[in-house]
Image: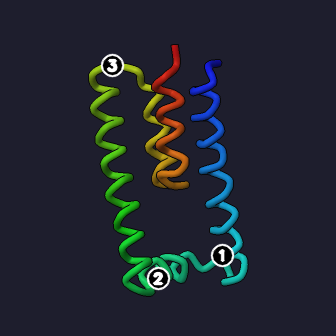
Amino acid sequence: MSPLRALYLGLALWGAVHPMYWFLTYLSQNAWDFGAMIDAWYVNASTTGLTWDLTIAAIALTVWILAEVAARRRFLGLVAIPATFCIGVSCGLPLYLFLRTRP
């Protein structure tokens, strides 16, 4: 594995574990209320802006993945879409780059 692919994989793992730690910490402190977590994403202008920033980035990444899968027929890249929406762009983007740079 090339150093660049190893870096992408490391970033994907970090992007999965680190945000999930904070999500699970929040949920455990708030009786596993997903509605409260979503409400917290819109508590002020700063968090609302960040939420929209990440949402737009996730949509752009999804469009890019779909376009590349249609052109290259490398369907394994599709696993980055649920990773993006279930974990976050911090996992989905480096995961897709890792899969895309596969020999």
Question: On the image, which quarter does residue 64 sit in?
Answer: top left
Question: Which three-letter amino acid code belongs to the residue tagged 1?
Answer: Leu
Q: Which mark is residue 39?
A: 2
Separation of disc 2 and disc 1 at Cα? 12 Å
- In primary-sequence order, the first of circles 1 and 3 is 1
Residue 101 spot, x, y in % from top left: 49, 22
Q: Nearer the viewer, residue 70 or 14?
A: 14
Question: Which three-letter amino acid code belongs to the residue tagged 3?
Answer: Arg
Residue with the mark numbered 3: 72
SS of the residue under disc 3: helix
Residue 13 spot, x, y in % from top left: 65, 44
Mark 2 nearby-residue class (10 Å; few <14, some 14–19, many ≥20): few
Residue sitting at x 55%, y 55% = 87
Question: Which quadrant does the N terminus fall into?
Answer: top right
Separation of disc 1 and disc 3 at Cα? 40 Å
- In primary-sequence order, the first of circles 2 and 3 is 2
Numbered circles on residues, count: 3
SS of the residue under disc 1: helix
- Asked if labels 1 and 2 touch by Cβ distance under 8 angstroms, the answer is no
Q: Which mark is residue 27?
A: 1
Residue 6 spot, x, y in % from top left: 64, 29
Residue 75 spot, x, y in % from top left: 42, 25
Question: Which three-letter amino acid code belongs to the residue tagged 2?
Answer: Asp
Separation of disc 2 and disc 3 at Cα? 39 Å
Question: On the image, which quarter does residue 48 sit in?
Answer: bottom left
Pick out the residue farthest to the bottom: 44
